[in-house]
Image: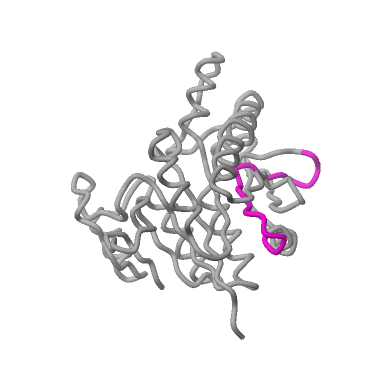
Amino acid sequence: MFKEKLSIIKIGGNIIEDDTSLNTFLKLFSNLEGKKILVHGGGKRATAMASKLGIESQMVNGRRITDKETLEVITMVYGGLVNKNMVAKLQALQIDAIGLTGADVNSIKSNKRQVTNIDYGFVGDIKEVASNSIDRLIKANFTPVFCAITHDGNGQLLNTNADTIASQVAIGMSKKYDTTIYYCFELNGVLRNINDQNSVVKYLNINTYKKLLKDGIIADGMLPKLENCFDALKNGVTKVNMGNTNMFTKENDNFTRITI
């Protein structure tokens, strides 16, 4: 059965922080053909805002501890400042965007992460994506713009990893669409040498991944990102691409294409 194409683009890092980079990306995003969904983080902006308010940001292994005060800051920054700024810029580019958290139209439900040796606080692990509700927005020609907030169905908002939101929404939507994920950040893709932007691993499958992992080339923040990629591909997503904004230009092929 023929499925219509759907692109799910997750942006993060310095693209969100730098107005020029953000405007460049949003223009490319607006020119992307077909149905699309945008997912964004905003961690650096949230950390800066928390600091202004005298709230210390606690990180463990690159993951944020989300206490009650931090959750309030994240809701303001992700769901307000960053999200609505993007939505307004997309409207200026004639994209009828609608800014969302996972609580809106009950689109993404999570469980509060259980306390083991670390208490992450109000952090959510996704349990359910309401693909039918999201699809109604898409079919009405709206472009959903999700921030990194979900909910538990009982009135509690939860901070949720934006990479995971992108992969889980893509898995949910893949039942209806031929779905591709684009992870867009400041690097050209997965790099063999973090100091050399031209050392891109252009094609990455599970075997290449295991070898690069063993050699210590893939580490730190790239690990959970790639785990999300392979999880998505094993669960119905057609393609995953990773790189900077140039991967949306036809003349560029210097980015990472991930397959099983």
What's the residue at 76%, 51% (across, down)?
106
* 225 or 186, nearer to the observer: 186
Taking the magenta stretch, the answer to whether it contains residue 11 is no
Residue positioned 74% across, 64% down in the render: 132
Quadrant of the drawing holding the N terminus: bottom right
Q: Which span of residues is magenta-colored?
A: 138-155
Locate residue 204 relative to residue 151 in the image: left or right: left
User: From this viewpoint, which residue is outermost toward the right?
Assistant: 154
For the view shown, which residue lies furthest in the bottom direction?
Answer: 1
Residue at figure coordinates x 66%, y 47% from the top left:
98
Residue 120 x, y percent position in the rendering: 58, 36
In the image, 193: left or right of 46?
left
220 is higher (above) or lower (below) than 254: above
Residue drawn where x is 40% and y is 44% of the image: 24
Counting from the top left corner in percent of width and height, residue 192 is at: 22, 55
Q: Is residue 208 above or below residue 141?
A: below
Q: Position of residue 174 (x, y in %)?
A: 59, 70
Q: How is the image coloured?
A: one colour
Considering only vertical position in the picture, is 191 above or below 17? below
**Quadrant housing residue 251:** bottom left
Please identify the quadrant where the C terminus is shown.
bottom left
- Asked if 2 appears above or below 214 in the picture, the reply is below
Tally of numbered tags: 0
143 drawn magenta: yes
